[in-house]
Amino acid sequence: MCQVDEDFQGQLEHTEVPSISKKCVKCKEKTAVVVIRAGDTYCRDCFREYFIHKFRAMLGKNRIIFPGEKVLLAVSGGPSSCSMLSQVQEGLSQNAHKKLRFIPGIVYIDEGAAAGRSVDDRKTAMAQMQTLFEATGFPFHLVPLEQVLDLSPSVLVMAPSPSEQPGSAYKAAVDQFIQSKGHWPPRPQDQDQDQDLDQASLPDIQESHTQLLQQLMSSTKTQTAREELLSMLRQHLLVHTARTKGYSKLMLGDCCSRLAVKLLSSIALGRGAQLAQDTGFSDSRYGDIITVRPMRDYSSKEIVFYNHMFKVPSIFIPGLDTMTADKSSIQRLTESFVTKLQADFPSTVSTIYRTSEKLQTAWKGSCAADVCDTCLLCLCALDTTVENASAFQATLISEQLSQTKPPETSSAINPNLNPGSALATTTGQCCSGEGECGKKGGGCCSSPRVPETTDMRSLLCYSCRQTVKDMSSVDHLPAYILLEAQRRNRRSQMREQISEFILDEGV
Amino acid sequence: MYAKICLIFLFLSRGGAELLFKGVKEHHVTLPTQSEPWDVKQLLVWIQRNLLKERPELFVQGDSVRPGILVLINDADWELMGELDYQLQDQDNIVFISTLHGG
Ligand SMILES: [Zn+2]
Ligand SMILES: [Zn+2]
């Protein structure tokens, strides 16, 4: 790559010495202020128009959000999600014909606990977000990540989606909206009055919850797995918030620079089978809540320039990966790789991004009713039920072979040496110690503890298995995940028993 | 001989500015007089020597800014202004914005 770089950089990038005060390619009159998409120069006014149009076009083209629908915007305070928020405001202020027709609300997840920030820092950030959201007049929800500990296992179950609406229904709904001359939907302030009340005070955070969350994060041995785990927990909390507050769409602010990084790092993380869902415009893995990414056509440069020029406020809040070294995690390394390549080859991000557009979900219709066929953590269809001659099976076999060791030496000397043996020990004590635990196969006690590592693993997709493997103990996972794992294990055991019975009957 | 040049520069990133520039986002600086005009390339060296003592790799790389950091000169894309070769004028306004997630 360096070779190519040296040979061609001169020709590709510096053929013409940039002359000061170029004209705008759109209006061909005014002086350009920004260069986007490998060489297009735009003046301030044309850039603004281009930017606003792109947002509406993205939503119009995909026809996923219906008039009057409640849409939850996930805003982190970063430039991309804040830009998304400003575009929604912009869209709602347009005249009836161009107006966005959904009812927005905002959610902010405070991840300070996972990033190890002090209580004071978190309060300051929370107050800043509150001020930002109050200015929009939209209902908003400030949710500390700690609340993930109170989730119920049902968040991990795909909910039935409301009946599929045909394309004609979209058009009818839009016509109806235009006839009502834009008076509908009602102004957001009119409803959610009671919610506004509890927004007034910042949410309380229990210190014990913060500690539990920090234990979970520190039980994860690699930064890569930590970032993966955090993004799963964040996602669960977002879906939960959307469900409990009555939203049917969840808008994320991923821009195309971000998605290009996500696409490549997902491949490195073994999430090839889930790529389309992880990076596409819309994602229906949760059934009732559809995730949409309306910012996926914007580069981070466009967003940053727009925000700066038109004073879109954003709040920089340090996260788990802030100021970390390039090689601290697969995600960071991929970001650095893509950014450096982009600096020399300006079409890098768009090339990767266009690849993501071609991906499609190979949806297995047969497993729709059966939750056991989706991953416990990421809720994507399991990619582990493949034939014996696959690369996946080969990896499993070689892993098993390399882990085989004399049964007594390792676990007896140091039970904490590897997570598998540590867990086996706990289970052993629990069942043999008091003898109260009842019959075999009935689940071990009522405590949310997964009997064996292997049982948890069978419920996960390939990539999530790697994430869990990097944890010193699954016991630190929030209760809702462990309870759901138990439930699924019990169910599959039960199904095994029943299936024998049914076979007998069939004969 | 050139007169002193007064600049305002901003550095915005996801928390990095706080650590890189000791919590100061906006800097008003006066560059010393020198025999030839100041350009952006020299400014980067000056910033590195005078304002940025820890972890310069998060801001500069080689002669230029680190990939992923955008530069605006008087609210315009520096790609339109000659990038490193732009000659600084008195009262110029330079903004550095990081687009990096982990930056
Ligand atoms: Zn123009
Ligand atoms: Zn998974």
Image (tube, coloured by chain):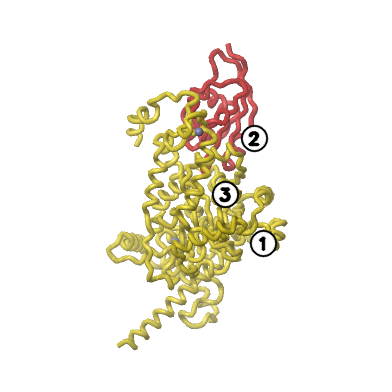
Residue at the image point whose x is 64% and y is 54% from the top? A138
* Dot label at residue A91: 3
Label 2 sits on residue: B24
Q: Earlier in the sequence, mark 1 or mark 3?
A: 3
Q: From the image, state whether disc 3 or disc 2 is nearer to you.
A: 3
Three-letter amino acid code of the residue under disc 1: Asp
- Label 3: few (<14), some (14–19) or many (≥20) C-alpha neighbours in 10 Å: many
Three-letter amino acid code of the residue under disc 2: Val
Ligand 2 sits in quadrant: bottom left
Element under disc 3 = helix
Q: Name the image quarter holding the N terminus of chain B.
A: top right
- Asked whether A420 or A108 is in front, the reply is A108
* Dot label at residue A192: 1
Three-letter amino acid code of the residue under disc 3: Gly
Give the percent coordinates (x, y) of residue B19.
60, 38
Residue at the image point whose x is 57% and y is 54% from the top? A73
Q: Colour of chain A?
A: yellow
The single residue placed furthest to the front in the displayed view is A179
